[in-house]
Structures are given as structure tokens and as C-alpha cells.
Amino acid sequence: MSSILIFCKDCGRQVPSSETREGRCLDCRVRRSVADLRDEHARLWRKRERYRSHNANVDQIGQQIARVEDRMGHRIKELVSNDRQATDYLRKELEAARGQRYTIKGV
Ligand SMILES: [Zn+2]
């Protein structure tokens, strides 16, 4: 292995240059590529909770959330060629997206 290690300019971790693009590691590129969708996901998730507390029908919002999650999956697949790795990334992003609401709610 003759790969050079460089510092990712977002997270500062040392990563092989072969895994970086424009100075960023794959983790950071994935995170950036889905950032807007993650915000959208959090927004819909909060909306659903609000509706649910009023006993409103939340099926449609559930479908919107599923679509956002689909789009996140597509974007991650564009960056990560390995299927299993892509699935791992998506799971991590979804956990983060779903976890975000607790942070926001807890404030
Ligand atoms: Zn990074």
C-alpha cells in the first residue's frame, strides 16, 4: 500500500488520498451530499409528530418521509460504489436524521 495519508479538510481525520475527493473523506462527502435532505427529513418528522398529537391523518407525511429517505439512498449510492457500504451509510444518516428531532425537541 503506497497510498498517501492526507487530512480531511472537514473532519480533520487522516485518510488515504485514494478515498478523498477535493480534500474530503468519504464520510464527509456523504454527509454533505445529503445535508439538505436530512433537514427536510427532520422538518417532515416534526410535522408528523405535530399532526399526530392532534390525531390528524399522518399517512401522507409518512409517504413524504419515505420519499426523502429514498432520495438520500440514491445520493449515497452515487458516492459509494460498494452496496453494503452504501447501506451502512444510509442507515447512519437515517439514524442521525431521526435522532435530530430529539435534539431539537429537547431544546
Ligand atoms: Zn472527513
Image: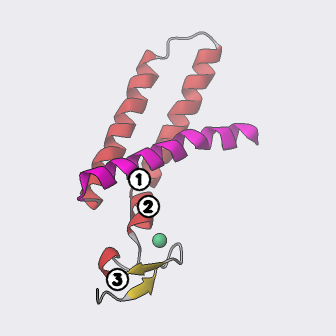
Q: Amino acid at mark 2?
A: Arg
- What kind of element bears circle 1? loop
Is 40 situated left or right of 51 in this image?
Answer: left
Q: Amino acid at mark 3?
A: Ser
Would you say the residues marked 1 and 2 are in contact, meaning their CB atoms lie under 8 Å apart? yes
Where in the figure is residue 76, as x and y percent of width and height? 32, 53
For disc 3, the neighbor class at 10 Å (few under 14, some 14 to 19, many from 20) is some
Residue 32 tag number: 2
For disc 2, the neighbor class at 10 Å (few under 14, some 14 to 19, many from 20) is few
> Residue 101 lies in magenta, yes or no?
yes
- What kind of element bears circle 3? helix
Query: What distance separates the C-alpha of mark 3 from that of mark 2?
Result: 19 Å
Where in the figure is residue 9, as x and y percent of width and height? 49, 79
Decide which of 25, 71 is in the foreground and name it: 25
For residue 17, above or below residue 57: below
According to the image, label 1 marks what residue? 34
According to the image, label 3 marks what residue? 17
Q: Amino acid at mark 1?
A: Val
Instruction: For marks 3 and 2, give the one nearer the viewer.
Output: 3
